[in-house]
Image (cartoon, grey):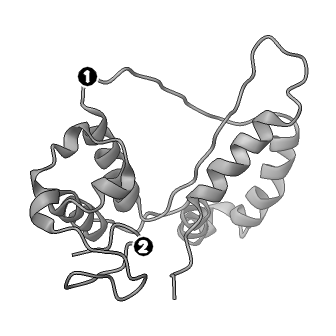
């Protein structure tokens, strides 16, 4: 069982970490978690915790573009005459970025799934990715200046995404 207040693993009637009264797993298992929109409640449901653990266990190390170039450089060395592909790419990429050369994809969809299912599926995807880059955009339409509102929203989002220190 996990404490719904601090998230620490606990047993008995009270959390040894924060002292909060523990809610039983029986009650959590009966919740229709597929309709739930609060992460703290979702993370207390045994089925959700099992899904997340299975996704994290299935995570595999992916090769970065830089790692691929390093391997390709070794394999193609006879053909390239010793030209360091990785070093050339490291020099060219920032220049391309300054010139606005890049690639991106975006996608949006209205899903016919219940909110809890979408949230758990998103968490499982993040757990299986093994590491995640998050990009966010805040827009205020119809205004020339947002008085820092968009920056504050982005700061709150990224602060919330940072790992929390364990409560002593």
Q: Identify whether 1 is placed above or below 27.
A: below
Q: For mark 2, what is the residue?
A: 6
Residue 38, compared with residue 131, is above or below; it is above
Please state if 65 lies on the left or on the right of 143 as rendered.
left
* Place of residue 49 in the rendered image (x, y in percent of width and height, measured from the top left): 23, 64
Q: Quadrant of residue 116?
A: top left
Query: Residue 70 in the image: x percent, y percent?
Result: 60, 69
Report whether 21 appears left or right of 141.
Answer: left
What residue is at 64 percent from the left and 40 percent from the top? 136
Q: In which image quadrant can residue 32 be found?
A: top left
Q: Secondary structure at mark 2?
A: loop
Give residue 126's position: percent from left, percent from top. 40, 55
Q: What SS does tag 1 mark?
A: loop
* Residue plotted at (49% across, 63% down): 131
Task: State the residue at coordinates (61%, 34%).
Answer: 104
Instruction: Return the mark for residue 140.
Output: none
Residue linked to disc 1: 112
């Amino acid at each position: 069982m996990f404490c719904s207040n601090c998230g620490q693993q606990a047993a008995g009637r009270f959390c040894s970490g924060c002292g909060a009264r523990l809610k039983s797993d029986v009650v959590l298992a009966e919740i229709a978690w597929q309709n739930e929109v609060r992460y703290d409640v979702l993370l207390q449901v045994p089925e959700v915790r099992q899904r997340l653990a299975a996704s994290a266990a299935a995570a595999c190390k992916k090769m970065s573009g830089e790692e691929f170039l390093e391997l390709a450089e070794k394999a193609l060395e006879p053909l390239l005459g010793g030209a360091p592909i990785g070093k050339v790419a490291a020099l060219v990429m920032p220049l391309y970025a300054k010139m606005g050369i890049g690639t991106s994809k975006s996608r949006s969809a209205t899903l016919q799934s219940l909110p809890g299912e979408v949230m758990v599926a998103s968490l499982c995807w993040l757990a299986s990715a093994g590491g995640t880059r998050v990009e966010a955009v805040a827009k205020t339409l119809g205004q020339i200046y947002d008085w820092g509102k968009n920056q504050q929203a982005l700061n709150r989002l990224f602060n919330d995404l940072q790992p929390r220190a364990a409560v002593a």
